[in-house]
Image (cartoon, rainbow, N blue to C red):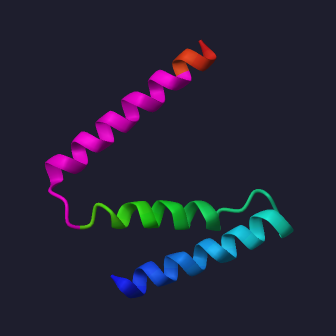
Amino acid sequence: MAILTRRLLLLLGIGFIHAFFIWYGDILLIYAVVGLTALLFIQVKDETILIWVISLLTAFVGIFTLILG
């Protein structure tokens, strides 16, 4: 897991450089953040992940509904 973390941090660094100095629509930064976040759930039970997914989805839908609606 240490190697994966190191690779994702390197990807994050490259993503920052690319996003801020080359092109603002870069996907590398998003991949690194999602990958690092996914590492937090690598040894979590399926039920816990399902609760997190439902909670975050409900929160995002609620926030966007309030902002746009």
Q: Nearer the viewer, residue 68 or 17?
A: 17
Asked whether, in this view, residue 1 is left or right of residue 27, the answer is left
Whether residue 51 is situated above or below residue 40 in the rendered picture: above
Q: Main secondary structure of the magenta part?
A: helix
Q: In percent of the image, x 19 and y 60: which residue is there?
A: 44
> Which quadrant is the N terminus positioned in?
bottom left
Q: Quadrant of residue 66?
A: top right
- The vertical placement of 24 against 3, above or below, is above
Query: Residue 28: percent from the left, percent from the top?
Result: 63, 68
Residue 10 in the figure: left or right of residue 55? right
Q: What residue occupies the far bottom of the structure in this picture?
A: 3
Q: Which residues are magenta?
A: 43-64
Q: Is residue 60 shown left or right of residue 50? A: right
Relative to 38, is 20 on the left or the right?
Answer: right
Image coords of residue 30 (percent x, y) = 58, 60
x and y percent of residue 22 in the render?
A: 85, 69
Q: Is residue 61 magenta?
A: yes
Residue sitting at x 26%, y 67%: 42
Rendered image quadrant of residue 53? top left
Q: Most extreme residue toward the top, as rendered?
A: 69
* Residue 15 image-quadrant placement: bottom right
Q: Position of residue 67 (x, y in %)?
A: 60, 19
How many numbered marks, from 0 up? 0
30 or 6: nearer the eye? 6
**Is residue 68 highlighted in magenta?**
no
Placement of 9 over or under 25, stated as above or below = below
Q: Residue at x 16, y 53 (%)?
A: 46
Could you tell me which residue is drawn at 37 percent across and 85 percent down? 2
Q: Quadrant of the C terminus?
A: top right
